Amino acid sequence: MSATQTHTEALLHLLAVASLLLPLLSFVISWLIPERHSWAVGLLDTFLMLVASVCAVTLLVRGWRHEPMVIAVSWFQAGNFSFAADLLLSETSMLMLAVVS
């Protein structure tokens, strides 16, 4: 695997994680902002959702015609059990992420 492929995959992973976590960050920040600064919630939420949408569309454009990738996420371990989740980045999942966001 060349350095360019590794760089491209790292960029795709970053875009996928950003487009999935920015709406959650938007919610948490909106919940934490005090009422006296509630005017900033609308601006900040709109900006973070715009960035998430741009990340999703960029992921779609850069990842189209790319082989499917799996992002392994280890959640936690309890005794001998390990709980993990995988994110599959295929053309279909990237298209749906762009459409939904």
Image: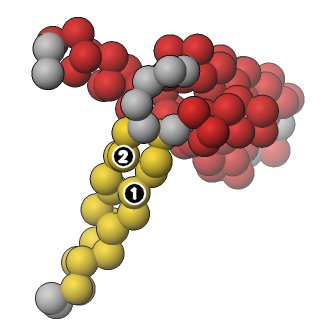
Q: Position of residue 30 (x, y in %)?
A: 72, 43
Q: Badge 2, how many Cα within 10 Å: few under 14, some, many 20+? A: few
Q: Which residue is mark 2?
A: 70
Q: Position of residue 15 (x, y in %)?
A: 48, 26
**Answer yes or no: do the residues labelled 1 and 2 have beta carbons within 8 Å?**
yes
Element type at marker 2?
Answer: strand
Front position in the image: 83 or 37: 83
Report the coloring of the rendering.
secondary structure
Three-letter amino acid code at the position of disc 1? Asp
Which residue appears at 57% of the width and 33% of the height?
Answer: 91
Label ID, residue 49 = none
Front position in the image: 56 or 64: 64
Q: Which residue is mark 1?
A: 86
Name which quarter of the figure residue 77 lies in. Answer: bottom left
In this image, 51 relative to 4: left or right? right
Q: Quick check: 5 above or below 101?
A: above
